């Protein structure tokens, strides 16, 4: 289990995350839903341990171990990975080199990972991870790298960002594949098509959890309440 307990995060005197507690299980897909600017990506960075995202108070636990003081490298070694919303570029590094950064990986595994994200391995392995790849192609390559890491928990920050709508089926297939590998998946999104692949959802507003439960119930509430809300970051009823 990956668990956040009573997390507060204050930056420049502004309280961004307000006493949030969440639980994530292996082999379970959990969605964090909410409009832009409500704190979803901040929670992702706190989970991953980015240096500028140390909680003001509260703790992060992995299988009962307090990892709040662990660096991003230490958390990666523990099996926590992050799929960035905006994929990176590496001048001079081929796709094959990039996918092998986590250690020696045989060609069969590389081929399987690229085929999962629907890229032709023969075409893409020798290509460079630079500006010649489109944003969607780089996103697919990064998803393939996450598959090869075989993480215990994977945070997917807007996995559909930069990918055309026809590729949503591919994202669904990746989620199913990782779930079968017992990976706990945390998806940050506001897309109904992505949320419906999850087992459980948290709805975030103003740095707080305002609703949680079965994903279908949460997305219905989101559509009827948050989509028509004309007050940014103020939960209904306040």
Image (cartoon, rainbow, N blue to C red):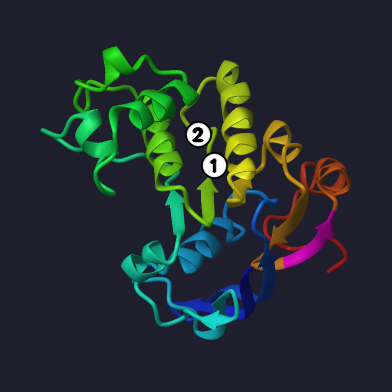
Horizontal and vertical percent position of residue 44: 52, 60
**Vertical relation: 179 (above or below) 9:** above
Judge by depth and name the residue closer to the eye, 221 or 106. 106
User: In this view, which residue lies farthest toward the bottom?
Assistant: 57
Horizontal and vertical percent position of residue 198: 73, 44
Residue position marked by numbered label 2 in the rendering: 161
Badge 1 vs badge 2, beta-carbon distance below 8 Å: yes
Estimate the spatial distance between the alpha carbons at disc 1 and disc 2, rounded to whole Å: 5 Å
Residue position marked by numbered label 1 in the rendering: 158
**Vertical relation: 55 (above or below) 198:** below
Horizontal and vertical percent position of residue 52: 36, 71
Crowd band around label 2 with a 10 angstrom C-alpha radius: few (<14), some (14–19), many (20+): some
Q: Is 214 on the left or on the right of 14, as rendered?
A: right
Q: Residue at x 47, y 79 (%)?
A: 67
Part of the protein shown in magenta: 209-213
Tag 1's secondary structure? loop
User: Residue 85 occupies which quadrant of the picture?
Assistant: top left
Crowd band around label 1 with a 10 angstrom C-alpha radius: few (<14), some (14–19), many (20+): some
Judge by depth and name the residue closer to the eye, 11 or 26. 26
User: In this view, which residue lies farthest toward the left?
Assistant: 92
Q: Is 232 on the left or on the right of 86, as rendered?
A: right
Horizontal and vertical percent position of residue 140: 42, 29
- State whether residue 63 appears in this view: yes
Assign the magenta stretch its main secondary structure: strand
């Amino acid at each position: 289990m990956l668990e956040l307990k009573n997390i507060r995060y204050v930056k420049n005197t502004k309280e961004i995350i307000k006493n949030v507690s969440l639980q994530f299980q292996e082999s379970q897909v959990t969605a964090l839903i909410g409009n832009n600017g409500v704190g979803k990506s901040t929670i992702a960075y706190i989970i991953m341990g980015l240096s500028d995202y140390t909680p003001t108070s509260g703790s992060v636990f992995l299988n009962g171990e307090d990892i709040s003081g662990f660096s991003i490298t230490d958390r990666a070694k523990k099996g926590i990975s992050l799929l960035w919303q905006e994929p990176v570029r590496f001048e001079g590094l081929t796709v094959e080199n990039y996918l092998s950064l986590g250690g020696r990986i045989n060609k069969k595994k590389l081929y399987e990972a690229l085929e999962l994200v629907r890229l032709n391995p023969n075409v893409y392995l020798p290509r460079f991870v630079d500006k010649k790849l489109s944003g969607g192609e780089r996103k697919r390559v990064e998803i393939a790298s996450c598959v090869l890491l075989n993480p215990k928990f994977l945070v997917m920050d807007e996995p559909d960002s930069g990918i055309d709508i026809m590729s949503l089926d591919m994202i669904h297939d990746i989620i199913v594949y990782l779930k079968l590998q017992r990976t706990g998946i945390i998806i940050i999104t506001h897309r109904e098509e992505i949320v419906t692949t999850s087992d459980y959802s948290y709805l975030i507003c103003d740095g707080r959890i305002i609703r949680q439960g079965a994903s279908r119930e949460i997305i219905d509430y989101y559509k009827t309440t948050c989509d028509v809300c004309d007050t940014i970051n103020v939960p209904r009823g306040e």
